[in-house]
Amino acid sequence: MISIYARRRSIDATSKILMGAATVIGVFFLFWILWTTLRFGVAGMHWDLFIKDTPPPGTDSFGLRNAFVGSLILLSISLLIGVPVGLMGGTWLAEYGFRSRTANVVRFINDIMLSAPSIEIGLFVYAVMVDPMGHFSGLSGSVALAVLMIPIIVRTTDEMLSLVGSDMREAAIALGAPTWVVITKVTWKAARAGILTGILIGLARITGETAPLLFTALNNQFFSKDIFHPIANIPVVIFQFALSPYSNWQQMAWAAAFITVLFVLVLSLVARWFLGKVQVPK
Amino acid sequence: MSESGVVSRLEIRPMSERPKSVGRPWGLPADFLFHKMAVFAAFLVAGVLFATVIAIAFDSRLSIHAFGIWKFLKSSEWNPVTQTFGAFPFIVGTLVSSTIAMVLGVPISFGVAVFIAEIAPAWIKKPVAGAIELLAAIPSIVYGLWGLLIFAPVFAKTEPWINDKLGAIPGIGLLFQGPPMGIGMLTAGIVLAIMVLPYISSIMRDVFLIVPSSLRESAYAIGATTWEVAWNIILPYTRSAVIGGIFLGLGRALGETMAVTFVIGNSNVLSSSLLMPGVTIPSVLANEFTEATTKLYVSSLIYLGLILIAVTLIVRFLAVLLIRRLGRREGAKA
């Protein structure tokens, strides 16, 4: 009898230690990656990064201005495309489709899109935009990023609108408000912290995306604001510079990676803070 | 919902139906327009999935026409000079690197999930769960940068040891022989394992937490240990969603591009050793797409993408289906 108890207890103890170790491994890699990014990123910081353009190979100057501007343009346009579509799609699911069969099918497909490898989206946008237009362009990059972002916004909007109680809707309808006013002025407002969280998470997700941009926006060595032609952007610059033999290019890759990670982490933290403000009804 | 974009599939919905604005049978133009815009957006969201498959299949037509299906799948010749293309090394590389990621990643994810859901004291739960979720927030290009410039040199130092110890085992020893380069199939698998960890473990954790406490408490009441509760009560109860979470991670691993491209070494030559450089479908796409000069070359690369989509689509479909099944059972009870 005692040996059975001892065995069970030792299995239990061993398993707890192993699970604790698994967690330590996960957290260890997080800190290792963050620490290296911080160390090399800060070492690579240079004022010229923000005021000069990417240098040609073989020179030892610094500069990422064109890439920063390009990335900001790409992200802004994806927000302009992704937020309205995602918001309206989520609104349809929560307010019109509700629990109908069609709505559940759309939710299912959206969940599949949520985990789509970004390279597939890049190929898709290449096939429908870059190939017909005949050349790479910043606009197609933004479309690819928007496609990646939309499922996240749809899902959060749907969930957050579903948390808004029926009493609020009923009160607004009782006052004679038409459906679109009920949605825009009452339910959207009640769920705005949650919806904003979804948009921030979506933005964080696409900020460092590189694979789809290789098939769409590509890169540009020079400063450009023309979204109908290839445009410089941070992720692709990191990709090209990291694999280069020049030490100043590698330093710039680290600096760019550091700024990207910082931006994504801040977005994630703000999103979490907003999520804390969402009131879950009992 | 969790913060990394890994969203728990357990829907909280009020049971009552949506109230409708009635008493205005003629309808307002603004209402009509708003409704149509919402319908259009939802249609667009659902349509993109089909459009992706169709557009990519259409763009690979040249290559499908030239090489057929079966021949393309089993041919290992990839030669831009003679314009002959085959997918075999890329398919094998994608499957091998993802298998390594799953073999390493799934047990660790399970450990993390059980630790957070069952073992950890309350004060440590939140920060640890948050830290693991942050792993999902780090862009894959940063994993690649770190993997190539930091992890690979460190890993190269352990490779002689792997050679000596694991390489000496008859049979599977073949998998662990090779020069200590630091980059290769095994490195890619390890980096992938870290990347899928937050996705798998947060799904597992979320579903572990919805196991009814009555089940858990009855097991503890008859004297079960924490491990026995986790393995014999919680895991069977959440099995479908746990498998779904694993499939979700597998889908990520199969399609991961940047991190793998950095550390896999990019060699089209198949090798029996995991320490040797390899190649995957996403990595060859990232490396060769912009350099592809002829139409057939580009089309063959897109054909590879089509194969990848076919595989990940099935994996993702199963993942969502399995995760939802548990959610529905819970919803019916609530």
Image (cartoon, coloured by chain):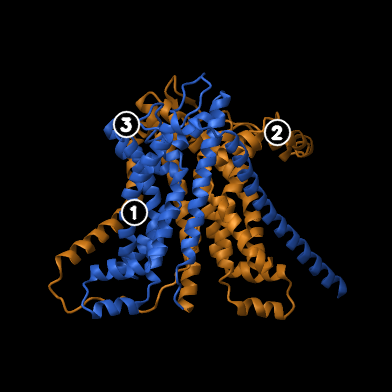
Chain colours: A blue, B orange
Q: Secondary structure at mark 1?
A: helix
Outermost residue, right side: A2
Spatial separation of the CA atoms under disc 2 and disc 3: 42 Å
Q: Which amino acid type corresponds to the residue marked 1 in the rendered image?
A: Val
Spatial separation of the CA atoms under disc 1 and disc 2: 45 Å
The chain under label 1 reads A
Q: Which residue is mark 1?
A: A83
B56 or A75: which is nearer to us?
A75
The chain under label 3 reads A
Please give left or right for residue B203 compared with residue B299 in the image. right
Viewer-side label of 2, 3: 3
Outermost residue, left side: B26
Say which mark, if any, is on residue A229. Answer: 3
Give the number of marks: 3
A250 or B145: which is nearer to us?
A250
Say which mark, if any, is on residue B156. Answer: 2
Give the crowd class for mark 3: few <14, some 14-19, many >=20 residues within 10 Å: some
